[in-house]
Image: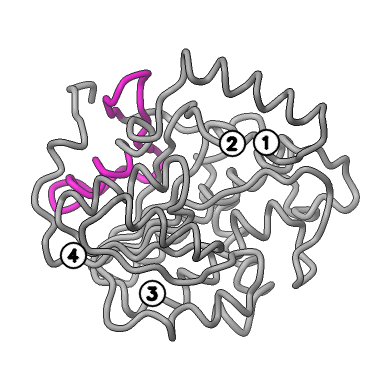
Amino acid sequence: MTSPWSPSRLGNLTGKRIVVTGATNGVGLGTTRALAQAGAHVILAVRNTELGEQRAAQVGGSTSVVKLDLADLASVRAFPSLVEGDIDILINNAGTIADRRTDTVDGFEMTLGTNLLGPFALTNLLLPRVRSQIINVGSDAHRTAKLRLDDMHLRNNKWTRLGAYAVSKLAVMLWGLELDRRLRAAGSPVVTQLTHPGWVASNLSQISDSPLMSLAHKTVKAVGDRFANDADQGAAPTLYCIKMCIRDRLHPQRMRAPSRYPRCRDRSAGPVLRDPAAAAHLGHRCHRGLPHIAG
């Protein structure tokens, strides 16, 4: 499906309540801006609430800012009590690349804990209140990941920044497939979808203030500003999923992905995403690893 589409065709979302994680920068900010402009009430679920308030003021429309640190399960547990009422759409957008091998306060590898386990726990806690849709924002980086279900935290295998990020995004997408399978099997009205924003000029590469990493970020940013999608273009696949939710449930082995410009299409996922057994195994491990949250 290659027909041009842009966020200007999102339509009227007045009355919709939508949670966007990682809403202060990059694709999350672009998503928040478009949703607010379309009339939705957007809940910015962010670690830095001061910056979140600044972004909400810039975006305008109907918004609220709620504290959420996906790398801290205590913060994840507290989040639902800070949000009143049902939620129409949950967008698991937040992601990180760690500068060095470190663990979350709960003892998980930081990249996996932030990109997978935090969103997994959040989704399970909010699921009874989600009315229509869950969107997981993945990455084409999943194609380079080597899945090691017995060492997801890379404690026994070599850890690298990009390697850990790729593993976490592959895990996010496998979890999305398993969530889709479970919701369908249960006859749930909630649709779950996968997207990836393509290469986006964002601050994701700004992971350290060291001279070498600062130079690397500046180089990546300069090239990205010239050739990559901007934040609004990167948000287009997520917004397209919202627009098409009523008409189209995405095939579980395909995902929404952008071209260089705000155009959305189905794109075949990497081979491992065609393995339902791997998705089920990962889902089981997440449930087992977070028993007090996942249920």
Residue where numbered disc 3 is placed: 127
User: Hey, what amino acid is under mark 2?
Assistant: His
Please report contact status of discs 2 and 1: CB closer than 8 Å, yes or no: yes
Residue 60: % across, % down:
25, 55
Residue where numbered disc 1 is placed: 145
Q: Residues within 10 Å of mark 3 (few under 14, many from 20)?
A: some
Residue where numbered disc 4 is placed: 16
User: Hey, what amino acid is under mark 1?
Assistant: Ala
Q: Earlier in the sequence, mark 1 or mark 3?
A: 3
Residue at left 28%, top 72%?
87
Residue where numbered disc 2 is placed: 142
Q: Residues within 10 Å of mark 2 (few under 14, many from 20)?
A: many
Q: Secondary structure at mark 3?
A: helix
Residue 72: % across, % down:
66, 71
Task: Using the rendered view, name the quadrant where residue 220 is placed.
Answer: top right
Image quarter in which the N terminus is found: top left
Q: Which residues are magenta?
A: 237-265
Q: Earlier in the sequence, mark 3 or mark 2?
A: 3
